[in-house]
Amino acid sequence: MQGTVEYDISRVKGPLANTFLILINALFFNVKLIGLYDIYPMDYGLRLIKDNDVTFDFIIVGAGAAGCAAAKEITEQNIWTVLVIEAGDYPSPSTEVPGLYTAFPRSKEDWQFLMEKDKNACQGTTDQRCLLTKGKVLGGTSTINDMRYSRGTPEDYDSNDMLQWSGNITHTIFGKVESFLGKEYLQYAYGNSGGIHLQLVNFTGHPKKLLHDAYRAMGYLPIPRRKFIGLTEHLVTILNGERFNMAKAFLTPIKDRPNLFMSKNTEVLGIVCTEPVDKRAVGVNVSIDGSEIFIRARKEVILTAGAVNNAKLLLLSGIGPSAYLQSRKIPVAVDLPGVGKNLQFHLSVPIYVAVDPCENCPKDYYRELDLIGDISEYVIYRRGNLSTTSINEFAAYILTKKSAATLPDIGIYHNYFKVGDTGLLAWLDAMNYHPKIVNSLIKFNLERAMIVFSVTLLKPVSRGEVLLNETHHLSNPKIVPKFLSDLDDWDFETLLRGFNHVTSMAEGEEMARYKAELLHLDIPNCRNFKFCTRKYIKCYVQNMGMPRMDAAGTTKMGEECDRMTVVRSDLEVKSVRCLRVADSSIMGSITMGNTVATDAMIGFNTGEILKEKWLKDYVSPFRPITHDSEG
């Protein structure tokens, strides 16, 4: 029922769950509800089943950042009807609490994409398989991520892979979708009228000072304007102590537009194209509550389902490598060898360092009374520890190899756990580590607080691929990551230097003041290697390295003559009219920032592209600059 609130804390375990339940019952209905569904568009799914002939001007597949942004732009034209299809449900109230962000991997709001086993990552998990967490919920990954917002760099968009999408154009568009109520921030000029609400956490505490001191001792300072190496405090998508996901940013303000329709818990089974000569997308087949129906698109179908599911839907629809489709007994509609190829992730290696968070102070324990205080303060006032992501918004961007380069190759993100921290249990559950690794971390945490340095590869050379599930095509697809598979070992060598950077910092004079200790975890596969040798570090990376939530590249944009490209610069799929891909799937190279920010920008620009095509005399102010026009 519209407006009903169901408090799902299935991913919040142990004493935290018990306390949360007590306080919900005692306080929520007497103070201020969180997670009310009526802030989102009403679900139109049952009406779709009942109607015989269902037709919309535009169908958007996927209600993540890109889909929500595109829907807002397109529905500004009241002559057009737009249907947004989402495989997941409304966000649960627990997603609204910033401090619970570590609890959502492997939840019902996660697609839970399990990758094929890879010798170079995730060997330290219980099943030796990497989990790619992506949001299966209104708002997509922005509803379950760590809320850290990062565009990347202008060079991410100026590269040849992005063709005519210059950094100047894309960052102008970013300014149109963002809202930051403050002065110019770091290297970007943020807008103040867009849908995405951004703010500084302004988290203060002992761990933040410790990190600043340690990095400064290594020569890293706050990043100056238009530079990208150094320390930064990221803006986050939080408003009034609650997560501000992309559905809130783009759909909530327009939820009552009469030309906007949304269908949740709706699975797209395939794209329907005309036959045989003039290929044109005319709609989609979907499943809603067990009923399969066809929904027609008068004008266009727009895929914003992410790098994994966009590739899956194209393959299911006969758009992809012809030999592969034939081997799967799928009729070939268009031979596009690049569909599903060029898959990229930000591979991250967490390094655990025990610390005393301040000099000459008692150990930083997390007690049950602190837990109760945190929850009550959050429930009543939306403030305190649960209203932030702690030091997660603080990041270091470093260049690990001496060169004239002006861009970093490693990003280091941080988490902090007090002694006996209940939050560590949620973190470890999400990581799905081998029991020996879990036990050693819990044992360390009983005596010491710890900082997690997540050393992250920003620009991987290795490329994976997405294929269809071999036993049931409609199930989650087969993801072959191919981590650290580049012939020159650039990816591993970069991570190795990043690892050594953290160990040098942990062993340095500055962190010695905080009694820092690089933790020697019990990793069963690495017991035969001497601690911190090259072979140990390689084993450590292979066992502890895991992908972040970002994924890109499986429907690469590029020149028409390049057989491995899938979409043109106007995002239309080659050889198929009126079918576009409009999210980070089109990136030839993944951005240094997170893909949520890029998705929002691409979704917004898709609206401009469609207006130029379907509205007479409309000229977008964000028209890409061609090489010819540059003179």
Image: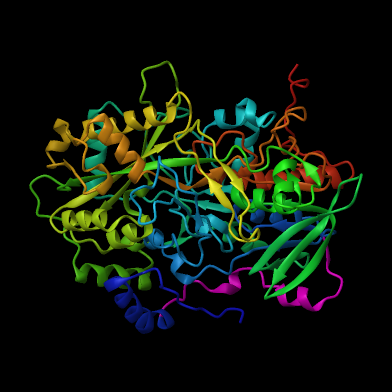
Residue 348 appears left or right of 337: left
274 or 434: nearer the viewer: 434
Which residue is found at the position 61% from the left and 59% from the top?
471
Which residue is found at the position 85% from the left and 59% from the top?
79
In reply to whether residue 51 is colored magenta, the answer given is yes
Outermost residue toward the left in this view: 360
Image x and y of residue 86, in percent: 65, 63
Quarter of the figure with the C terminus: top right
Which residue is found at the position 36% from the left and 18% from the top?
402
Image x and y of residue 112, in percent: 50, 59
Which residue is found at the position 56% from the left and 31% from the top?
156
Quarter of the figure with the N terminus: bottom right
Count the marks: 0
In reply to whether residue 480 is colored magenta, the answer given is no
186 or 259: nearer the viewer: 259
Is residue 382 placed above or below 198 in the rendered structure? Answer: below
551 or 404: nearer the viewer: 551
For the question of whether residue 516 can be seen, the reply is yes
Q: Provide the residue span drawn in magenta.
A: 31-56
Image x and y of residue 607, in percent: 74, 48
For the question of whether residue 607 can be seen, the reply is no
18 or 68: nearer the viewer: 18
Residue 507 appears left or right of 247: left
Residue 403 appears left or right of 615: left
